[in-house]
Amino acid sequence: MRLLFLAVLRRHTGNAVTAQRVRDHLEAAGHVCILKDAFDFESPSEISNFIKAENLEAAVALHLYRGGRLLQGNGIPFGIIFGGTDLNEDVNQGDKNKVMGKVLEEARFAVAFTESMKETAQRQWLKYRKPDRSHWLSYARFMAQPHAKDKIYVQSQGIATVPNTAFNWNTFLQHSEINQSADNLHVFLLICGLRQVKDPLYLVDAFSEWHQEEPNIYMVIVGPEVDPVFTREVKAKVKRTPGVRLIREMAQEDLHAVMKNCFALVNSSVSEGMSAAILEAMDLEVPVLARNIPGNSAVVKHEVTGLLFSDPQEFVQLAKRLVSDPALEKTIVANGREYVRKYHSWQEERQTYRQLVRTLERSPED
């Protein structure tokens, strides 16, 4: 099939990485998959023209609102992959909620990264509705739709890490203006796009206080400048905060190399679908400290596969404990790596999408 894949493709963001990985899965199954940025289209009519011009037969969208709303009524079957903000943020906005419900009703399938995400979607949109028996065609269409429990599939993100073996950690530290020996350094890495939902400034003040007590402790924030206004706020804050550095986005292989060399990976987001950075850190045998929110607690079990904190003070307490307790670090690292290899198989993810895309090849009555 010739497939359209719609996603928000800001460089070096989690959505872009996920979209490229799923696109590779679909192409490996023999499909032609055209990956396009949802922000390149302003309306369903523009998508309709593109579909006709490219002779596309089906589509997949990552993010129920940003991608899915553009596929409505275009006459081709499509599937949806939930992101994070669609279920955690957009769902609370009345107009967007209504649009997303209609998109989900039309979609052949939907993919949630966790059981919790699936349950959220079911509560919001896939409640039982009585069929309209007054018109035979409406009733037939209703009966042909898959039941809610059969429409949403849970497939966790597949993880594969490939650090750049030629990456120079000491050079990176110098560019980050960290002029200390790497041997006695503890770098906590926060990877996120600079937007409010990722809350990169949440830990900055508490971390800086710790740095002033222990100057070999640093926090490095790495990520693309997604929200220009918020980015200026982050830059200004970091510039005047000792012990915290801000680095622009990096190529994936270099980012994995940085991750592998840092002491721990930090996530301070207000909401997450499923953080690929957390899973990549586990795969690279790097301990994880994550804010205790549903998306993070779905993959991080406290004191087993990582550490969960509820406020900046608790973060510092847990981080200090991790620095001073090598046995805890060793346990978390081993458990995290085992968890990723058991539940986030790249090969299983590929098989799932191969099977799901087949539902776009046949009529809904089949």
Image (cartoon, rainbow, N blue to C red):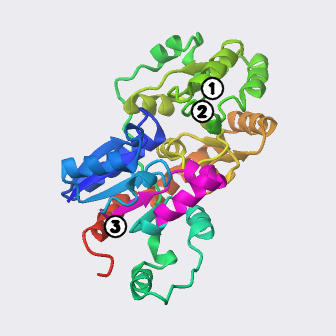
The answer to which quarter of the image holds residue 230 is: top right
**x and y percentages locating residue 306 in the rendered image:** 63, 48
Q: Looking at the picture, which amino acid does disc 3 mark?
A: Leu
Q: What's the mark number on residue 230?
A: 1
Q: Which residue range is magenta in the image? A: 76-104
Name, please, the residue furthest toward the front: 134
Is 179 left or right of 308, judged from the image as shown?
Answer: left
**x and y percentages locating residue 175 in the rendered image:** 50, 12
Q: What's the mark number on residue 319?
A: none
Would you say residue 305 is visible in this rendering? Answer: no
Q: What's the mark number on residue 356?
A: 3
Q: Which residue in the structure is indicated by mark 2?
A: 195
Quarter of the image containing the N terminus?
bottom left
The answer to which quarter of the image holds residue 31 is: bottom left
**x and y percentages locating residue 182 in the rendered image:** 55, 19
The answer to which quarter of the image holds residue 111 is: bottom left
Considering depth in this image, is 131 or 329 the residue closer to the camera?
131
Q: Dot 1: few (<14), some (14–19), or many (≥20) neighbours within 10 Å?
A: some
Element type at mark 3: helix
Magenta part mainly helix, strand or loop? helix
Q: Looking at the picture, which amino acid does disc 2 mark?
A: Arg
Point 63% across, 39% down: residue: 197
Is tag 2's residue or tag 1's residue first in the polypeptide sequence?
2
Mark 3 to mark 1 CA distance (whole Å):
38 Å
Is tag 2's residue or tag 3's residue first in the polypeptide sequence?
2
Is tag 3's residue or tag 1's residue first in the polypeptide sequence?
1
Q: Is the residue under label 1 in contact with that under label 2 (CB below 8 Å)?
A: yes
